Image (cartoon, coloured by chain):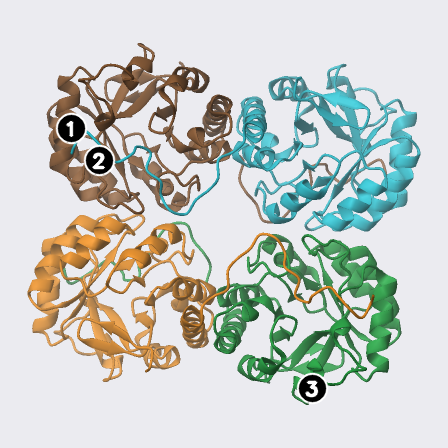
Chain colours: A brown, B cyan, C green, D orange
Amino acid sequence: MADQLQIGRYTLNSRLFIGSGKLPHTLMPEVIAAAGAQVVTVALRRVDFTHPEDNILDYLPKDIILMPNTSGARNAEEAVRLARLARAAGCGDWIKIEVIPDQKYLLPDNYETLKATEILAKEGFTVLPYMSPDLMMAKAMEAAGAAAVMPLGAPIGTNRGLKTRELIGIMIEECQVPVIVDAGIGRPSHAAEALEMGAAAVLLNTAIATARDPVAMAAAFRQAVEAGRTAYLAGLGPESSLARASSPLTGFLD
Amino acid sequence: MADQLQIGRYTLNSRLFIGSGKLPHTLMPEVIAAAGAQVVTVALRRVDFTHPEDNILDYLPKDIILMPNTSGARNAEEAVRLARLARAAGCGDWIKIEVIPDQKYLLPDNYETLKATEILAKEGFTVLPYMSPDLMMAKAMEAAGAAAVMPLGAPIGTNRGLKTRELIGIMIEECQVPVIVDAGIGRPSHAAEALEMGAAAVLLNTAIATARDPVAMAAAFRQAVEAGRTAYLAGLGPESSLARASSPLTGFLD
Amino acid sequence: MADQLQIGRYTLNSRLFIGSGKLPHTLMPEVIAAAGAQVVTVALRRVDFTHPEDNILDYLPKDIILMPNTSGARNAEEAVRLARLARAAGCGDWIKIEVIPDQKYLLPDNYETLKATEILAKEGFTVLPYMSPDLMMAKAMEAAGAAAVMPLGAPIGTNRGLKTRELIGIMIEECQVPVIVDAGIGRPSHAAEALEMGAAAVLLNTAIATARDPVAMAAAFRQAVEAGRTAYLAGLGPESSLARASSPLTGFLD
Amino acid sequence: MADQLQIGRYTLNSRLFIGSGKLPHTLMPEVIAAAGAQVVTVALRRVDFTHPEDNILDYLPKDIILMPNTSGARNAEEAVRLARLARAAGCGDWIKIEVIPDQKYLLPDNYETLKATEILAKEGFTVLPYMSPDLMMAKAMEAAGAAAVMPLGAPIGTNRGLKTRELIGIMIEECQVPVIVDAGIGRPSHAAEALEMGAAAVLLNTAIATARDPVAMAAAFRQAVEAGRTAYLAGLGPESSLARASSPLTGFLD
């Protein structure tokens, strides 16, 4: 009955995933609460398992789903290694694959990402690959066992919105697994647009971290995501190029 | 303390105004409730004061602000006549001025609208002129006593969004009175964008009426408007063209 | 037979008008030649009739049409005065009306511009009003005797392109007089787009003046304007949202 | 001295490549002449080597560079087979790789395309892969020996323009080999925009074939491509958001 999102074996009520990379740890609980987020991604290389003090994991609510990411990995092998370390350290079986050799635009390497996806899906991970939007590559990720695909709307951290909407729209139409827009979303209107198009969810980090008031911004995104999803389910009216009168032009004045 | 919208002598909590022109009367109470709307516009020429049955006014909650509009007027004189009739009939002192001689794109006549604004403001109306976006004309409306200005985002009924955002953005920056985007908004993301830019409110009609489920769509717009407003107040982060890493590229893998 | 542009009593072969406000005088002859321009606009208040040395007029080819503009005028009266002075000084009967009270975005005052248009058209001027794009105001300019209307694509000097294309497109469709896009065009692709849409011409200044090589840029715009016009006449194919194969998918491999 | 385009061992003066897939053969000579094209792509599976009558090759000027394409190939192996057949049949050593398993949006398979690129580059072909825009994959194509990369602006045949400009802009900035925009370009302004951004060339088919007058449209594109390239070399002025006066606001009226 409820409108829920299925990712692998997991059923979610929230369609707003949150990153932890740019916010002070102490702010995370409030941001997560305001966003209503159930899934939080954490860069594994930022977790210092040997020095438990100031560990980001200590600041996350116990009931969220931790989605470690392989940020810092430059190829499939490094991503696979990080994923296995995460699971061994008790971080659960979700893994967001980030393979980013490009240090200027931080664009992912789809092919290495695909290889890591294939390996980790076979090992039972719930794999969410971050990718450059590309239909055929998304279908390959799907075939390799990805639980969802995560195309970028614009380069990481740019707050530029759905610059790749043409390609993402096609992915949404043609993919079987959920499409989660993962980078570039900088405003609630961007998030609403993604959900209106049929995206299953969005993942945010910079937009919240660079706001003057991150907690309020998290709340704004929560509403925008819900608005976009509701609109998608409610069936948006068509666009037209000619005007149509709101009120029939008859009566009263005649 | 609360974030309220001042229009003339009135203080509002809702920034989502609703039109009644394309929906079955019987659906209006539910739509208004779902939208959380406090202001509803009604075309005067559609109100048949002599046949009270099936009168749209009967379907509006008692606590909303009725904003009659002069739809059907082709010049200032007709608009003024309609406004006075409305007040005499007990419709209150709000008036949305629509002067639309163009029957193809339904575009307003700013000059006739300005003339009607001047006359009606002097007569004590709370005047909200619907206009083609234009800074100098908006400032003239302001000087003539408009309580707010209502530029179009795209032609009426097109659901095309903020096609005139360049001009509306300048109006928001330079006008003293609230700027309320009044036509063209077709999706919650459009409404959120308007509020994020600093628009004071939006007015919707077609977007809700052409949705498969108008009541759910009204709820979606309510959330989007709140999201956009919250984001505006929370201070949006800047856009950048180069990527910025979400996580500092150090540690763990080294 | 030839595709010519009729402005009042004048027949032109070039659809690229040039401004002179930001370039060194000595560069004007080369820029005009590279642009193939027949119409050049000059700010009257920059012409010092009492000190003929370094007078911009001395740098203009004899066979161009001089279009003085009323830049600096803040209302209709000032614009009318400038226009009369120009004609009296032998500058011919073309006048581009600029009435710009706004000193931040340099946006025109459509209403004062309309008043000046009406007066000057009756006095036999060939009147080209610079305006904020607005269909009903353009039709009023037409009725007042404007020989063409000149809507802005974006604020003067911004190089931002056709940000107002929605409103300009409607003006092109509905106006009887030529529509000439006058501000904001920053790239040859912007100029080509305007002509493809059916604009009669474009007027440029900043785009050429801010180029590293203004003469080469003038030549680029000349080609772009011709390309856009040719495409308009050749009938552009429709856009589609689904792909259509370039080559029928049969044969050879089967 | 001249501004030429180097593709592998070849030096070109024209930056407008033409497809032959949708036009009547008899129109090709005129279209190629009007476009000033030096490179023409032909779908190999449409060339019936056994029935020389009505062979597209007979309609191409002798001095153009024939660029056979592997349209119809669904994987690397099929593309490689087609390329070898083409060379064996005397079609020269250029090959445009198209591997398109998706029959709805006709989107290329970047991974299979990369595999074919690697094989054929080693065999001495001048390889131009058609691809979904993606920086890391473009760099992989480069490393595999591609002479240029050909990202799509929008799905084939849609005439929608540079919908992927965000990704193409990054490819232009970061790739060593020329970037040639290959699908989606529907208007001369789209082509000019690609060249202004720094694309090395564009390839057209549908835009010309769906024009009312294909020969005139080919001429329009030729001018637009030259305009865009000239502008790129002449150094475009910056965009600004605030207006800058074209004429200093002093003198005359004061």
Three-letter code for the amino acid on which mark 1 is drawn: Leu
Dots 2, 1 in contact, CB < 8 A: yes
3D distance between C-alphas at marks 3 and 1:
73 Å
Do the residues marked 3 and 1 share a common chain?
no
Label 3 neighbour load within 10 Å: few <14, some 14-19, many 20+: few
Do the residues marked 2 and 3 share a common chain?
no
Three-letter code for the amino acid on which mark 2 is drawn: Gly
According to the image, label 3 marks what residue?
Answer: C58
Q: Tell me which chain the residue with mark 2 is part of.
A: A
On the question of residue B109 being in view, the answer is no
According to the image, label 1 marks what residue?
Answer: A82
Residue B142 in the image, given as x and y percentages of width and height: 80, 40
Image quadrant in which you'd find residue D68: bottom left
Label 2 neighbour load within 10 Å: few <14, some 14-19, many 20+: many
Residue A72: mark in rendering: 2
Looking at the figure, which quarter contains the N terminus of chain A?
Answer: top left
Image quadrant in which you'd find residue C153: bottom right
Identify the secondary structure beneath mark 3: helix
